[in-house]
Image (spheres, grey):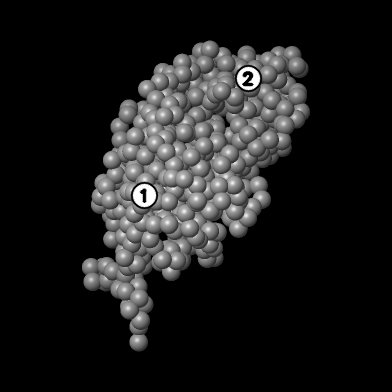
Amino acid sequence: MFSRRSFERFCVLVLGLAATGTLVEAGPCDIYASGNTPCIAAHSTTRALYNAYTGALYQVKRGSDGTTTDISPLSAGGVANAAAQDKFCSNTTCLITIIYDQSGRGNHLKQAPPGGFKGPESNGYDNLASAIGAPVTLNGKKAYGVFMSPGTGYSNNAASGTATGDEAEGMYAVLDGTHYNGACCFDYGNAEISSTDTGNGHMEAIYYGDNTAWGSGAGSGPWIMADLENGLFSGSSPANNAGDPSISHRFVNAIVKGGPNKWAIRGGNAASGSLSTYYNGARPSVSGYNPMSKEGAIILGIGGDNSNGAQGTFYEGVMTSGYPTDATENSVQANIVAAKYATAPLTSGTALTVGSSISLRATTSGYTTRYIAHTGATINTQVVSSSSTTALKKQASWTVRAGLANNNCFSFESVDTPGSFIRHADFALVLAANDGTKLLHEDATFCPQTGLNGETSSVRSWSYPTRYFRHYENVLYIASNGGVHTFDSATSFNSDASWVISNGFA
């Protein structure tokens, strides 16, 4: 005999049987519905979160003409149609402009507006994410996550059905456990409707990173914590919860849920195993958090006041009405594990060999005798040929190294200044000694791809995948296609950001 709960789970598992004639596994939001805590927001660029969902997952905009298109799952309840994106974005850049809400409530995430913390754009809006910065596979099928660099953010300040006041809610997010920093604040969840800090308890969102300004867990981080506004909480104490471990699985499932004078943090490896509970208890005793004053906006990648210095990668996540049981969340975890998230190649085009010496030649008409070189710390282009001095040939030659921050990409060490690498600083490319810091390693990691001009190679920044090696007035920058800086000019961008990679001069 089935118990009532087992029978309900069985019914969810066979949803769609009559329509399709095949057994269809429940999606995360089907599982939450069976637990009487339905999704009121469901966001993913990698897959459908309901087993019958066939609508758009996200929208991309290409740099060549500003045209947009929606990307949907390959089939009901399935993985995103990455091939459609690749075709649409061929030989140009693409940004993710909308992450659609699959719940039917219209809680779509769009470019975050100005708030208490002003965005990096001239109009105060946050940046949009590259459409290709976070490739993965799910059960062997290619998809793309949302790789968010500092300055990138999405939100919806007029969401429907989200918890307000002290109402109960739950949420999870599947994240890249290796892509984080200590800046404020890489969040997903409930926030202020004004994009300003309106006081303690006005937020309830998942936080992931190693910020220690308000609280911390065990070890050195990163941690799953809750951003409750004016505090990142790892437990009841504002300072530290030794039961909240440092967690850095490549794919992390992060969970926060809260109700009247209770809340919890749970998490685990999104690619295997079960969930653990890191906190389950009463609200913080600090004034303002019991009862809560949640406002019901939704944010991704930023804090409630649009603080956008953080970085991270988002693959999927939901918010619920009501306080989910651990059993429901355990079933969702099993569903996520069954999706079999795995890494995918970050590079394409010309194959590079670690340890080899290369030179990179410009392809823009009138500049094809110029190569990427350096003068002191400045990375520039110079005219180089077989008759150039030995010193110049060395300045225009680079030793390929495994990426300092991600060994699926590459770093470029100076031949004539061993131990120094090309890195970006304030979007200019400079030569800098490897100081061993996480920031330098990230700034010095780059991912070559098939050239934006349809030939040769382009080299994008790993940590800012909207930005590419681009020569502008013979100086090198990581530039975006049509951004706010002069060196981001869309004019001749594809040519200026495409390079012939050949054997090094030295």
Is residue 482 visible in the rendered image? The answer is no
Query: Crowding near pointer 2: few (<14 within 10 Å), some, many (20+)?
Result: many
Given residues 416 and 180, the one toward you in this image is 180
Residue drawn at x 36%, y 31% as measured from the top left: 113
Question: What distance separates the C-alpha of mark 2 from that of mark 1?
Answer: 40 Å
Would you say the residues marked 2 and 1 are in contact, meaning their CB atoms lie under 8 Å apart?
A: no
Instruction: Measuring from the top left, give residue 341's x and y in whole percent.
Output: 49, 56
Is residue 505 visible in the rendered image? The answer is yes
Q: What is the quadrant of residue 74 in the picture? A: bottom left
448 up-or-down from 432: above or below: below
Q: Which residue is mark 2?
A: 379
- Front disc: 2 or 1: 1
Amino acid at pointer 2: Ile
Instruction: Measuring from the top left, give residue 93's x and y in whole percent.
Output: 42, 32
Instruction: Measuring from the top left, give residue 428's x and y in whole percent.
Output: 57, 21
Q: Which residue is mark 1?
A: 43
Amino acid at pointer 1: His
Instruction: Measuring from the top left, give residue 440's x and y in whole percent.
Output: 65, 32
Residue drawn at x 36%, y 56% as measured from the top left: 168
* Quadrant placement of the N terminus: bottom left
> What kind of element bears circle 1?
strand
Residue drawn at x 73%, y 21% as measured from the top left: 394
356 up-or-down from 318: above or below: above
Query: Crowding near pointer 1: few (<14 within 10 Å), some, many (20+)?
Result: many
Q: What is the quadrant of residue 429 in the picture? A: top right
Residue drawn at x 34%, y 54% as measured from the top left: 167
Given residues 495 and 15, the one toward you in this image is 15
- Going by the image, does 229 lie left or right of 182? left
> What kind of element bears circle 2?
strand
* Quadrant placement of the C terminus: top right
Given residues 135 and 440, the one toward you in this image is 440
